[in-house]
Image (cartoon, helix red, strand yellow):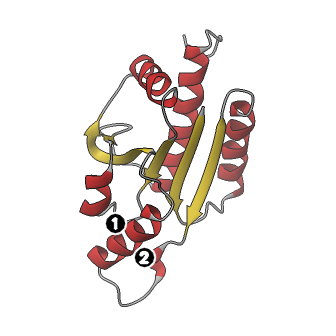
Amino acid sequence: MNLRLIQFGKSKDAWLLEALAEYQKRLQPYCKLEVVELQDESLKHNSSPAQVMDKEAALCLQKISREDYLIVLDERGQQKSSLEFSSFLTNISDRQNVVFVIGGVFGTSAALKQRADLLFSLSAMTFTHRFARLILMEQIYRAIMIKNNRPYHY
């Protein structure tokens, strides 16, 4: 299983880096998970939210091939239970590489959402992109444990 997670900005908090590293380590025996941190365009001055989202979409689309299955996290996207997510991830990852995109501080542009094969919501609640990355990595790990009948999901 080849997975890629693209996010904007770098995670800097030690506690968060430690948690992310733990899930990365737990996933290693089961899949390849590449994390790509792209430049946070919101830090540049004199850019409107729309300009920032367009710049971030352009950067992101350069990292995605036509064959990749693209999942864009969006608060209005489809929600799945952990069991449904495990089944879904197993089915698509057997056929192609899967790329998850966590938008920047302003969200994701319409162009990126149009390219997406799935708009996916982690919850009806809104999370910071840093928390979204941790929650997503935990759910990917949980999905793989379910697939492999490992005692993580009860």
Q: Residues within 10 Å of mark 1 (few under 14, many from 20)?
A: few
Tell me if residue 90 comes above or below residue 9 in the rendering: above
Residue 10 located left or right of residue 115: right
CA distance for labels 1 and 2: 8 Å
Q: Nearer the viewer, residue 74 or 88?
A: 88
What residue is at 60 percent from the left and 29 percent from the top? 141
Residue 25 coordinates in the image, percent (x, y) = 75, 37
Of the residues under marks 1 and 2, which one precedes in the sequence? Answer: 2
**Tag 1 near tag 2, CB within 8 Å:** yes
Residue 48 located left or right of residue 150: left
Residue at disc 1, secondary structure: loop
Single out the residue that lies furthest toward the bottom. Answer: 46
Quadrant of the snapshot with the N terminus = top right
Residue at disc 2, secondary structure: helix
Residue 57 coordinates in the image, percent (x, y) = 38, 66
Residue with the mark numbered 1: 106
Residue 92 coordinates in the image, percent (x, y) = 44, 29
Type of the residue with mark 1: Phe
Q: Nearer the viewer, residue 139 or 96?
A: 96
Type of the residue with mark 2: Ser
Residue 66 coordinates in the image, percent (x, y) = 41, 51
What residue is at 50 percent from the left and 72 percent from the top? 40
What residue is at 62 percent from the left and 60 percent from the top? 11
Residue with the mark numbered 2: 42
Q: Nearer the viewer, residue 68 or 6?
A: 68
